[in-house]
Amino acid sequence: MTLPLSVLLRRACRALPLLALAGLASTALASTALAGAPSAKRPPAKTAAVMSDDSPDVVIYGQREDVVQFGRALAAANQLDPEWVLAQLAQARFQPRVTQLVMPPPAGTPKNWAAYRARFVEPQRIGAGLRWWQDNAEALTRAEARYGVPPEIVTAIVGVETFYGRVTGNFKVIDALATLSFDFPTGRSDRSAFYRDELGAFLRWCAAEKRDPQSVLGSFAGAIGLPQFMPSSILKYAVDFDGDGRIDLNTHGDDVVGSVAHYLAEFGWQRGLVPTVAVTPPADVREKALMLVNDINPSLSASQMREHGAILPADATDALGPLALVELQNGGEAPSYVAGTRNFYVITRYNWSAYYAMAVVDLARALRSGHTDSVAAPAVPAASAAP
């Protein structure tokens, strides 16, 4: 990880031995006396405390020319007060922990669907999800009527993202986004341009809603609220679903429900379409490899999958639309497979991971099974359940 110059200089200063620091202080005092300072006895100089390398490094972004230029351009392009924009950026601070968390796992780390699933489809999260569903039943029903997204899918996404608000992130969003915009770590593909766009969107959102940018907390990547929307997604897809003239993704369940459903609808959610269908992949290695070429992008009809040697339930017809053979690794064990429909692909637009989407689908299925409210969407057909 490449650290800002100011951080490197500060750490170099920390490394000076205490005796050297004391010597510097003595030299300064002697120079003052020779210059004619009063000869009265002075109290002994205090030795400066040596800061730990684990303490936060302070980078004042407002003093960097590249940040100032960014702020001026942002203000001009979006009719924002330039003094306000620069004042907000001047208060942003570099966060070393953010640069650590944004890094990918070490090369060679095996994926394990069974372990991943166990984190999200478990009794506590299911119980919390059923309570959240009950608390927001009216909004979930309205959202399904308007956008076609079933209550269990919306509820499952909020559960996977933040455990229904228990884990929304405690980073100052402006700090996280400034760090990733102007000091993105080396060692992975550079996404600083993406985060600069998100930083701009964040300041635009705060200005529009008259929010204090210094008080908004979120994830290390700058995601906000129960649904963990990035700032640009808030501007594009978040909705005022309770009609109070304000979008609140932290405490207003209606806004959370409406925004998640609207997001999925905008990416092509199809009303009434199951997200997955059970599948046994072809026994022929070459046929299976051909089916996996397009990854999670659905491209084969049910008939075509059967022609390749895949086994699908009898009720899986071409009416489902295109399907994708999705492979989920299980560490050293045999992989799991599922056929993903267009709606499965839509869930991956929320988080570009088949493992994430499958966790949402399985949690949604568990929530639907445990839900006793008479007002809800039709259950996922048993023949379409994931293996």
Image (cartoon, grey):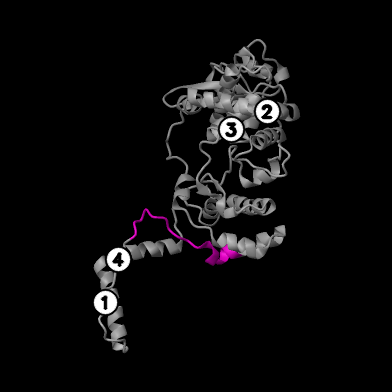
Please state which amino acid type lies under the numbered disc 3.
Val
Q: Is residue 293 visible?
A: no
Looking at the image, residue 8 sits to the left or right of residue 318; the answer is: left
Q: Mark 4 points at which residue?
A: 16
Element at badge 1? helix
Query: Disc 4 on helix, strand or loop?
Result: loop
Q: Is 57 located above or below residue 306 in the figure? A: below
Please report contact status of discs 2 and 4: CB closer than 8 Å, yes or no: no
Q: Is 127 one of the magenta-colored residues?
A: no
Q: Main secondary structure of the magenta part?
A: loop
Residue 375: % across, % down: 69, 19
SS category of the residue bearing label 2: helix
Please tell me how crowded label 1 is: few (under 14), some (14-19), or many (20+) other residues with Cα within 10 Å.
Answer: few
**Highlighted magenta segment, given as a residue range:** 51-68
The amino acid type, in three-letter code, at marker 4 is Leu
Contact between labelled residues 3 and 4, with CB atoms less than 8 Å apart: no
User: Which residue carries the number 3 mark?
Assistant: 158
Element at badge 3? helix
The mark lying in front, picked from 3 and 2, is 2
Identify which residue is drawn at 68% across, 46% down. 235
Outermost residue to the bottom: 36
Read off the residue under disc 1: 26
The mark nearer the N terminus, 2 or 4, is 4
Nearer the N terminus, badge 1 or badge 4? 4
Image coords of residue 174 (percent x, y): 56, 53
Distance between mark 1 and mark 3 Cα atoms: 60 Å
| Of the image marks 1 and 2, the number of the one nearer the N terminus | 1
Q: Nearer the viewer, residue 86 or 67?
A: 86
